[in-house]
Amino acid sequence: MTEPPYRVRVPDLSFYQEAVACQSACPVRTDGRAYVTAIAGGEYERAYLIARETNPFASTCGWVCGAPCEAACRRGKIDAPIAIRALKRFVNDRFGVYLGEAGDTRLPPAWPGYVGPTNAFDLGNTTFPTSRSGLVAGRKRSSRTGKRIAIVGSGPAGLSCAHDLALLGHEVTIFEAAPVPGGMLRLGVPEYRLPREIIDLEIQAILALGPQLKLGQALGREFQMADLRSDFDAVFLGIGTYQSRRLHIEGEELDGVLRAVDFLINVNLHGYKLDLGRRILVIGGGNVAMDVARTAARLGQPAQSGGDLEVALDVARAARRLGTTQQVDCLVVEDRSEMLADPLEVAETEAEGIRIHNHLAPKRIVGDGRARGLETLTVSHAFDEHGRFNPQLLPNTERVWPCDSVIVSIGQTGALDWIRPEDGLRATALGTLQVDPVTLATSASGVFAGGDIAFGPRLIINAVADGQKAARGIHAYLQGEPPRLIRRGFSTPIARHAYPALGPVRGFLRHARQPPPLLPIERRIGVTQVELAYDEATAREQGERCLICSLNPVFDGDLCILCNGCVDVCPTDCLKLVPVRDLGGDEPLATLVGQREARTAMLLDPTRCIRCGLCAARCPTEAVRMESFRFTEELTYAVQSSDA
């Protein structure tokens, strides 16, 4: 049987939710479309509240989020995605924890969580299972639970879990092995990318909700899993992955060979003074490798800490001349196009004078008690025909790279040596804890896990989402009932005369993406912040680039006269009239066709639609109208889930 020319989908609630691609791609379902358009309209406080509603680390993510929302952004199919992360930082600088979450300058430690009336604003598409307002509403329906939860690890997963559990009325205690909270936010992210004040203030905002924090408390050292399970009603493990993977080559034990995570932790905690020498080699091609290389290049240079900048610059230049770090090279197995690092991070790394060399695999480290060189082999290709990492090395291509230090950055794994047989925890072959993907429950009753220790190293926002998911799983476990998700969608027709004021702004396609400004290369000293914020005019223009994907053309077949006017006027050719016999799809399509007995169908390609509204304006019978879609999701505790 011949396959129909057009495979189609009948629009339903999920279709319209997925149309807002930025929100669908965000692990915590932040409505990027809503806060971007709020910025375009000058509504900065509302924009911040939308960003904060589903994310307790909204200010942090404005600086360092990997922005999966931008990768999914429909504007990227036209030219370049909206600068969603940089726009979040723009509003965070005005209303985030950096300014007390209320726009008023305050001094720590008097930093409460935002207490403004969030219901005074339209917060866009609301995802109640992870939103502050939804959690508070859930707590109001019941008094404090009296249940005690232990959270091990104060990284973004553990703190997000603590945030949500506190809002649900539980008593939370956080155990952290390090002398400071924050996990890899503080220990792994360089200070020039994420100011430590931001981390401090967002943690304080979470602790202000009630969780207790105990520092210097390591699992397997100060306490065991059995202790937590006997003293608490539930446990969440968010301990991260702090062990760097080894190369397993000759010379790896020499002095001057460092592990990436250990190196970053030492620098970020201002530990022992490192003398890396003049020539440094970094092995690896991921984002951590780029952070390591850029941090290593800054060592030996005094950080800007007040005083005359010109003097600081002169001292830094002199430090280079007097023998501190002079050259940093990154040696990468993969091709440039296959590197795991963000292309923007790679570009910034090279802009700072760090050289990246591809198609090189380490063979052995040579030295005399201390590393003096790295011998490599040329790699013909890093992946086999099945897409698996399987480097093919070219014989007789050895080369020795002289160096004073080698920093290995080829990935991290978790430490699970604290697990005892009686704990009932299962580990995977990848060195992570085995968890249920929905509830994040482990194989041990009442014990949950998330973040890197459950899924391996991922984005910060993934860890936040894991903490939220675990909080829901823990709450359901303590309630003794599975959660029930209620989804509701709403579509509001927009009159023709009103659409120009509600749709994309005039000339929005002419606005090009403009990256946030960067500090000039010659002024990047120590922990001086590299990325700067948009000014107001630029931020509003960047916000105006949004296609506003919650706006959709909707077609009424009873009013359509098949004039083809909408198809003719469409500037992106996203509409097409076709015979019904040419359609292929699932059961909803067959049901719809059978009900209507139609011979012709209007097809819409939502990936090409720019929400210009010309189809609705052109239609002589108003068979096409623009509608604004929004949805809510609410989590209650019953036996079954349902859609509404």
Image (spheres, rainbow, N blue to C red):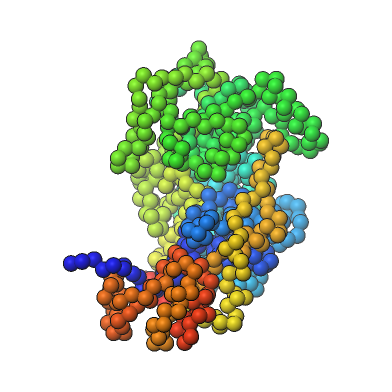
Q: Residue furthest top?
A: 368
* Figure quadrant of the C terminus: bottom left
The percent position of residue 601, horizontal first and vertical second, equals 35, 77
Classify residue 269 by image quadrant.
Answer: top right
Q: Residue at x 53, y 80 (%)?
A: 617
Q: Is residue 270 above or below residue 13?
A: above
In the image: residue 432, left or right of residue 130:
left
Q: Residue at x 67, y 20 (%)?
A: 323
* Figure quadrant of the N terminus: bottom left
The answer to whether any part of residue 211 appears in the image is: no
Of residues 141 and 542, the one nearer the viewer is: 542
Q: Residue at x 28, y 70 (%)?
A: 584
The answer to whether any part of residue 51 appears in the image is: yes
Q: Is residue 415 above or below residue 97?
A: above
The percent position of residue 420, horizontal first and vertical second, equals 38, 40
Q: Is residue 17 above or below residue 258?
A: below
The percent position of residue 17, horizontal first and vertical second, equals 45, 68
Q: Is residue 424 above or below residue 290?
A: below
Count of numbered badges drawn on the protein: 0
Q: Residue furthest right?
A: 308
Q: Residue at x 49, y 77 (%)?
A: 615
In the image: residue 608, left or right of residue 279:
left
In the image: residue 586, left or right of residue 483:
left
Classify residue 317 by image quadrant.
Answer: top right
